[in-house]
Image (cartoon, rainbow, N blue to C red):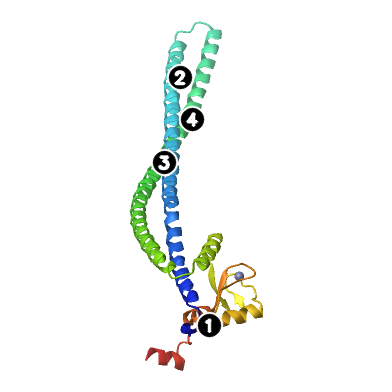
Amino acid sequence: MQESIDPQIVALRTLQRQDRKLTVYERKLRVIPKRLRELDTDLRKLESMLDAEREKLEETRLFQSRQESQLQDEEVMAKTSKARLGQIKTARELNATQRELESTRRMITTRTEEIAKLQKAVSETEQRITKMDAMLSQLRSQAESEKERLATEKDRLERLILKARKRREKLTKGLDIDTLRTYERIRKRFPDGMAFVPAHRERCTACKMMIPNIIYMQLMKGREILACESCSRLLYWSGHFADDVEKLEPKPKPAPGSEEAAADAS
Ligand SMILES: [Zn+2]
């Protein structure tokens, strides 16, 4: 059927297919730097969380050691008061010293409890840090291998793009300059780069709008390339290309166990 239609249709369709591949390669290549940045951001986030935990640990330890030296002072105070009790002459003095000793003992109890709490916090933070440290080194090695993979992928895509561009250059030579210009102009307007699309069952397959009958009839003749009135993409009739029809109307797979399936298997 292809021999009877305008060769421009065939040429433009081939170019569109080539460009579709190129668009996919280029899009894949564009996301690589973003992915690399994400990897670094994740690492930095965990690193700064870990730094914060370490700082917190340092502060708690410092506070704990201050509490411990205060406890030592209080213990000395208690000892001194106790020793003084033996040398006391008056009842008033005795009272005062006993009160002083009691209050020091209360302080010692409170501080000892406080120190135990701090010690608990310290060991909890230490455990957290150990876990995060392990996570960080795991993440680092994952990021490392992911970066290697991305570098290989980048090389591969760049080679494919180079090849695809050369191929497209050859393909554009087979096209009328006006057709090519229109195609390029439309292509830039759509992120998927689809500017030459099949019309199928009286609809534009890109925007899904109905195509007026008169235009559809012309498309079926295959003598010219016409634009979709809704999305302005260029159109051709799907019926001119068997693989388009197959793609647009995939045959349902025969149910397993049916005669057709058995025939397929043989
Ligand atoms: Zn359309």
Give the side of residue 99 with respect to residue 263, left or right.
right
Mark 4 sits on what residue? 114
SS under mark 1: helix
138 and 248: which one is in front? Answer: 248
Q: Which mark is residue 47?
A: 3
Quadrant, the C terminus: bottom left
CA–CA distance in space, label 4 to label 3:
30 Å
CA–CA distance in space, label 4 to label 1:
84 Å
| Residue neighbourhood size for the residue with mark 2, other residues' Cα within 10 Å, grouped as few (<14), some (14–19), many (≥20) | some
- Comes first in the chain, label 2 or label 4: 2
Give the side of residue 74 with respect to residue 133, left or right.
right
SS under mark 2: helix
The image quadrant in which ligand 1 is located: bottom right
Q: Is residue 208 above or below residue 37?
A: below
SS under mark 3: helix
Q: Is mark 1 within 8 Å of ligand 1?
A: no
Which label lies toward us, 1 or 2?
Answer: 1
Which label lies toward us, 4 or 3?
Answer: 3
SS under mark 4: helix
Which label lies toward us, 4 or 1?
Answer: 1
- Comes first in the chain, label 3 or label 1: 3
Direction top: furthest residue: 89
Which label lies toward us, 3 or 2?
Answer: 3
Q: Is residue 201 visible?
A: no
Locate residue 54, reporting x and y percent: 41, 35
Mark 2 sits on what residue? 74
76 and 195: which one is in front? Answer: 195
Tell me if label 2 and label 4 are in contact, CB under 8 Å. Answer: no
Locate residue 61, reporting x and y percent: 42, 30
Which label lies toward us, 2 or 4?
Answer: 4
Mark 1 sits on what residue? 239
Locate residue 114, reporting x and y percent: 48, 30
